[in-house]
Image: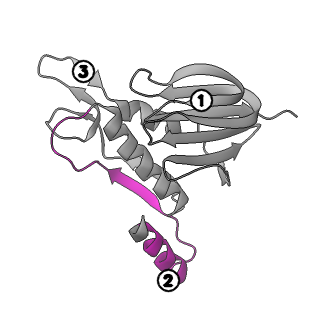
Amino acid sequence: LKFAARWRKYLDKKFPSSKVRVSEWTHMKGGRDSSMDSALVQARVMYEDLTVLNAVSWQHWIAVSDVDYCDGLIYINPHRTYEITKRYYAFGNFSKFIKSGAVRIDVGGGTDLLKLIAFKQQDETVVIAINLSEKESELNFGKSGKAYVTDKDSSLAEKNFNGNFSVTPKSVTTFVIIEEV
């Protein structure tokens, strides 16, 4: 995080009109990992890149992998079977809901263990909550909408909420709030 902040400061000073595009990110860890632990590492990095570096795009290194490395969103196996990782779904918490042209807006209520990022687009607000904690966290939006939960038991599971929502431990949840016209 400190490096990203220093890098952003350098870019602002030397190249103020430059836009950061993050490409080819990978976890850089040996062995396959399909768990929420790996998904939370990726989600935290995406959050930092979007909020600290003000990245305008973010890409994963490789979508489909056949090696014993923590790099793919989907792993293929020798007998033509595949395994979808929690990284895939956590990536979807961002890519499925943040549309081209969305504008990042300030959102309060986040902590070191509950990262919040929000975007305004057309007639809706999208808030992504990354809960790094082993405990639930309560959020109140004052409005209703749909939540999409990725955690150890769910993969982009759709749920309705009416203002309040309990964010599950070690999860990535996207909230879509339709603005009334």
Q: Is residue 135 left or right of residue 28?
A: right
x and y, in percent, of residue 142 in the image: 78, 35
Towards the viewer: 83 or 59: 83
Going by the numbered disc 2, the residue's amino acid type is Lys
State the separation of the CA atoms marked 1 and 2.
43 Å
Which quadrant holds the N terminus? Answer: bottom left
State the separation of the CA atoms marked 3 and 2.
45 Å
**Disc 2 target residue:** 14
x and y, in percent, of residue 30 in the image: 15, 44
Task: Tell me where the magenta segment starts and ends, as one range.
Answer: 4-33
Mark 3–mark 2 contact, CB under 8 Å?
no
Q: State whether residue 164 appears in this view.
A: yes
**Above-or-below relation of 14 to 120:** below
Q: What residue is shown at x 31% (from left), y 46% (from top)?
A: 61
Mark 1–mark 3 contact, CB under 8 Å?
no
Element under disc 3: strand
**Extreme residue toward the left, this view:** 78
The verdict on residue 17 being magenta is yes
Going by the numbered disc 1, the residue's amino acid type is Ser
**Disc 3 target residue:** 82
Q: Which mark is residue 166?
A: 1
Going by the numbered disc 3, the residue's amino acid type is Tyr
Q: What residue is shown at x 52% (from left), y 55% (from top)?
A: 50
Crowd class of label 2 (few under 14; some 14 to 19; many from 20; radius 10 Å) = few
